[in-house]
Image: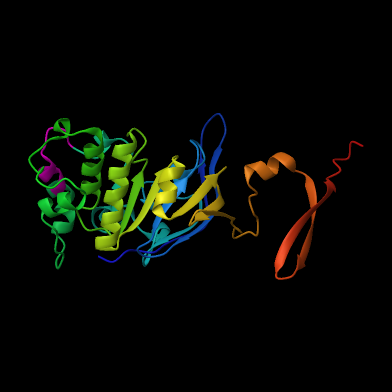
Amino acid sequence: MAGLAVTCRRVVHIYRAEAGDVVALAGVDLSIAPGEMLALVGPSGSGKSTLIALLAGLMRPSAGRITIGTYDIGKLTDAEISRLRGTEIGVVLQGVARNLLPYASLESNIRLAQSRAAKSRGVRLDDPERILALVGLGGKGSATVGQLAPGERQRAALAVGIAAGPGLLLVDEPTSQLDTAGRDEVIAALETVNAERGTTIVVVTHDGEVGARLGRAVTIRDGRVGAEGRGGQDFAVVAGDGTIQLPPEVLGDFPPGTLFTVDRGDGGVSLIPSGSVDDGTS
């Protein structure tokens, strides 16, 4: 299956609670091309895991629109979204135990993940051994989770995520508990899947090195797209409502309320600080 495009337009998500509502996402605009690899980077609580859960259809956005391929996620029934997760969207949750049955062999885990897609007519699924070889675990089909090293377990979870041949693979914190060698093995496996299958891959991570390796990194900060990194260079991003999140180091010098004049010339735009907002107390 070819990679699927992903589009988010002004996506908002609010967690309702008795103690008060929490805005996890505050108007996310994001476009991912078919076959692209992208990292969602940010600290805990920034909203990146919420965004990937929305892309997986595990939750519904409070507002905004999400499209994956030709599907408008907000218009699908729960049954239709469940079918997509079993066929066209692969999901690897944080924590290996949430993706693999510990008592079953890796081959059995993969065949179970393929069961829904196997019932669809005209779908040709790879043999489990071929899938394991793709993530660097060739010859380990009879092994169980307990017989694998930490990095191998994470790659086994990836194998289950790609078992049905999805066009979109969503991976939450795949390297958070791995050493450098294990991290590099997981990244190499993701790169191989992308290169050989053309799968669109979105990875949630707090590790900037992972973002740099995947080629495109989008920073999520305070529920918004804060910046984007490509080829080692960082860029500010204009959101759909016209706002731009300034880098934290800039905000340290120009706190909220600072006034800027906008000077447009020579093909560029300059922001010139000219004072602060009068709050009426002076």
Question: How many discs appear?
Answer: 0
Does any portion of residue 27 appear in the rendered image? Answer: no
Relative vertical location of residue 105 with respect to residue 200 in this rendering, above or below: above
Instruction: Classify residue 33 as left or right of residue 82.
Output: right
Q: Quadrant of residue 206?
A: top left
- Residue 255, image x and y in percent? 74, 41
> Is 123 placed above or below 208 here?
below
Left or right of 180: which side holds 103? left
**Is residue 71 part of the magenta span, yes or no?**
no
Q: Quadrant of the N terminus?
A: bottom left
Quadrant where the C terminus lies?
top right
Q: How is the image coloured?
A: rainbow
Residue farthest along the right direction in this orientation: 282
Task: Indicate the position of residue 261 as horizontal and vertical percent values.
Answer: 81, 57
**Residue at x 30%, y 60% (from the top left corner):** 199
Q: Nearer the viewer, residue 239 or 23?
A: 239
x then y, percent, for residue 188? 29, 49
Locate residue 201: give its quadrant: bottom left
Q: Which residues are magenta?
A: 101-110
Query: Which residue is found at the position 56% from the left and 37% from the top?
Result: 21
From the viewer's perspective, is 60 left or right of 91?
right
Q: Using the image, determine if residue 256 lies above or below residue 218.
A: above
Nearer to us in this view, 271 or 5: 271
Of all residues, the one furthest to the left in this rendering is: 142
Query: x and y percent of residue 172 in the render?
Result: 36, 43
Decide: is 4 above or below 208. Answer: below
The answer to whether one can see residue 170 in this image is yes
- At horizontal 26% and vertical 56% (from top left) the residue drawn is 193
